[in-house]
Image (spheres, helix red, strand yellow):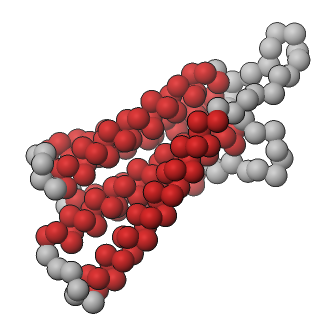
Amino acid sequence: MKAIQDGISFFFIAIVFVLSAISIFGVWEIFDGDVIYKSFLTLGLLSVISIIIMIAGRFIDNKPADGLIVPAVVNPAFGSIRRIMLGALIVSAAVLALLGVSAIWEVMKGEVLWKAVGSIGIICFASFLVVMTCREREMTLSDDPHKKNVSLGTVIVLVIVGLWLLSMFSGF
């Protein structure tokens, strides 16, 4: 089951990258508005499905037939991906705040500002989804009792809020 969950997680991370790039191209009108709308819907659907698969995997008994419990090894790629995307999340959130302040003080105006805000918002949300996916894979397999998983309700609420914010920026 661990291999299936890891594979689904890597697949989800790859799809997040592809659909985020498509969404950013849609914001900058390289693709049609219908493409960005469909990529948002696909990203939301894949988010929900991946959450269901990862959570459902927690309830499957991973004990071998002989009764010995073998500790699971966390794939080190998840830690590396999480650290890289956490950096991208921090940088994009800081740039988003800078653009917001620029808009408030009317330093930047117009369509380019909103396209930049939308693009950086997409990068923030994609980074958040990847960080949460990697963190879930790392925490599920951890034997450390001090590490706590994020609850399913928190993840669902944050995904819904993120999709709502992205839809506000994209005009859909």
| Up-down relation of residue 161 to residue 136 (above or below) | below
Q: Quadrant for the C terminus, please.
A: bottom left
The number of callouts visible is 0
Q: Residue at x 52, y 33 (%)?
A: 9
View extreme (top): residue: 65
State which quadrant residue 59 falls in.
top right
Q: Residue at coordinates 36% horizontally, 77% vertically from top-left?
A: 98
Q: Position of residue 96 (x, y in %)?
A: 36, 70
Q: Nearer the viewer, residue 75 or 56?
A: 75
Q: Nearer the viewer, residue 44 or 109?
A: 109
Left or right, residue 80 beside residue 14: right
Can the viewer see residue 132?
Answer: no
Residue 66 in which image quadrant: top right
List x then y, in percent, for residue 49: 46, 34
What residue lies at 52% left-to-right and 50% top-to-bottom? 84
Q: Residue at x 74, y 22 (%)?
A: 61
**164 or 135, which lies in front?**
135
Residue 50, given in percent of the width and then of the height, sits at 49, 35
Quadrant where the image shows the N terminus:
top right
Up/down of 75 relative to 111, above or below: above
Residue 130 in view (yes/no): yes
Give percent across and percent down for residue 159.
45, 52
Vertical position of residue 109 compared to residue 53: above or below: below
Residue 82 left/right relative to 108: right
